[in-house]
Amino acid sequence: MTKLTVNNQPVQYRMDPATPLLWALRDASNLTGTKYGCGRGDCGACTVEIDGEAVRSCRMTLAEAEGRFVTTIEALSRDRSHPVQQAWVAEGVPQCGFCQSGMIMAAAVLLKKNPNPADADIDAAITNICRCGTYPRIRAAIRHAARVNAGAEPIAAAPPPGIDPADAARAVPALTPPPAKPGS
Ligand code: FES
Ligand code: FES
């Protein structure tokens, strides 16, 4: 039994202590925002925050995570209100999106350590890989979040989670709900 704290909740995993933390988070805790890309520490899709550091969770075993405080993308904020999430929306960063939760976690950790990073600092700290090449927008969003954190710039609230069925129907007419039957 391995005990650690995940998203401020004490958790005990009845799994082989050699299991990568990534699989405990995804398979046992259903925290599927943390992604599996390469499984060898290269891509950063699995990045979570552990005790204030950005860590590739595919390369840490449950045993190594014992007693530590883990934060995943699901707990960065409950309502997308974290400045990094807001800046990500404002700058339209994601393309396919697969790398993005790892990027956002790495960016959030960077801004805690360095509130005003230059592009060189961003490139040095965030070694995650984006196969869609969103790097220029990632840098712009991190600089944007830094300005918001410093109070130098307001930011429009990102839309709430979920999707309005009417919006979906506008984009995909086949999703338009059928008219209600008389008497129903
Ligand atoms: S899945 Fe962990 S670094 Fe790629
Ligand atoms: S947005 Fe597609 S991999 Fe980064």
Image: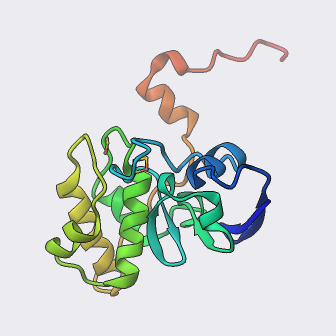
Q: Quadrant of the C terminus?
A: top right
Left or right position of 74 against 109? right
User: 117 or 22: nearer the eye?
Assistant: 22
Q: Residue furthest right?
A: 183
> Measured from the top left, where is residue 116 in percent x and y?
25, 83
Question: Taking the image as four quarters, which one is ligand 2 found in?
Answer: top left
Q: Quadrant of the N terminus?
A: bottom right
**Residue positioned 44% across, 22% down in the render:** 172
> Measured from the top left, where is residue 35 in percent x and y?
48, 45
**Residue positioned 64% across, 15% down in the render:** 178
Residue 149 is drawn in which quadrant?
A: bottom left
User: 8 or 138: nearer the eye?
Assistant: 8
Residue 141 is drawn in which quadrant?
A: bottom left
**Residue positioned 24% across, 40% down in the render:** 132
Is there any visible trace of residue 72 in the rendered image? yes
Left or right position of 116 against 103? left
